[in-house]
């Protein structure tokens, strides 16, 4: 069994997943509502929005989509946690996600981690970056 974060967006899923490609690596696969059986269930202005996106970068898989504007809710009470082995890579990913976002806890050494920090990216997704201390 494995869990995969499925992120919901308010019309900016494509931009978010292109940003995540830059931050995390990998290539996102995306499809829009247009030309699918779901097209008849969304308004004309949503046809170009993302029905489904999937990004795989190493062992990380993120999925997401745009939802109707009247049903979008800002993420609350949850974060996407990334476990990164290399402190320099943890710094790079944290700084990339923080660009245009809000840092809740700067990336720093803690009693359990070589680096740990929390950031909400420019798209409203909360992240926790954890780089455990070497054993």
Image: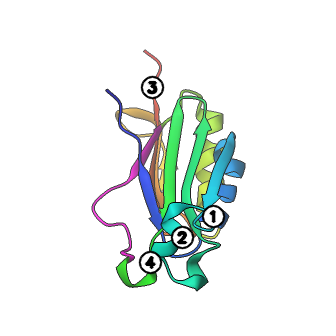
Report, in whole angstroms, how far the alpha carbon at label 3 lies from the one at label 1: 49 Å
User: Do labels 1 and 2 touch, CB within 8 Å?
Assistant: yes
**Which dot marks residue 133?**
3
In three-dimensional space, the C-alpha distance between marks 4 and 2, rounded to whole angstroms, equals 12 Å
Residue 106's x, y, as percent?
49, 56
Tags 1 and 4 touching, CB below 8 Å: no
> How far separated are the C-alphas under marks 3 and 4?
42 Å
Q: Which residues are magenta?
A: 72-82
Q: In the current view of this chain or complex, which residue is farthest to the left? A: 77
104 relative to 43, above or below = above
Q: Look at mark 4 in the image and give the residue it sits on.
A: 68
State the CA–CA distance, disc 1 to disc 4: 18 Å
Q: Residue at x 51, y 83 (%)?
A: 43
The x, y position of residue 86, in whole percent, is 59, 28
Between disc 3 and disc 1, the foreground one is 1
Q: Find the distance from the CA under tag 3 to the CA under tag 2.
A: 48 Å
* Badge 1 or badge 4: first in the primary sequence: 1
Label 1: element kind: loop
Q: Name the image quarter holding the N terminus.
A: top left
Q: Is residue 90 magenta?
A: no
Q: Looking at the image, which residue is at 54% across and 64% down? A: 121
Q: Mark 3 or mark 2: which comes first in sequence? A: 2
Q: Quadrant of residue 26?
A: top right
Return the residue at label 2.
39
* Label 2: how many Cα within 10 Å (few below 14, some 14–19, many 20+): some
User: Mark 1 sits on what residue?
Assistant: 35
Question: 82 and 26: which one is in front?
Answer: 26
Secondary structure, mark 3, is loop
Residue 80: x %, y % from top left: 42, 49
Query: Closest to the observer: 76 or 101?
Result: 76
Magenta stretch holds residue 81: yes
């Amino acid at each position: 069994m494995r869990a995969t974060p499925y992120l919901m967006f308010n019309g900016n899923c494509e931009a978010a997943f292109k940003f995540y490609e830059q931050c995390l690596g990998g290539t996102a696969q995306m499809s829009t509502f247009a030309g699918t059986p779901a097209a008849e269930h969304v308004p004309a202005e949503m046809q170009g929005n993302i029905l489904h996106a999937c990004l795989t970068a190493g062992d990380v898989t993120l999925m997401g989509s745009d939802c109707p504007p009247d049903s979008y809710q800002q993420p609350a009470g949850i974060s996407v946690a990334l476990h990164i082995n290399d402190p320099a890579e943890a710094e790079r990913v944290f700084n990339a996600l923080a660009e245009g976002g809000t840092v809740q806890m700067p990336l720093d050494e803690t009693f359990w981690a070589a680096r740990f920090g929390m950031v909400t990216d420019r798209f409203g997704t909360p992240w926790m970056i954890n780089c455990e201390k070497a054993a």
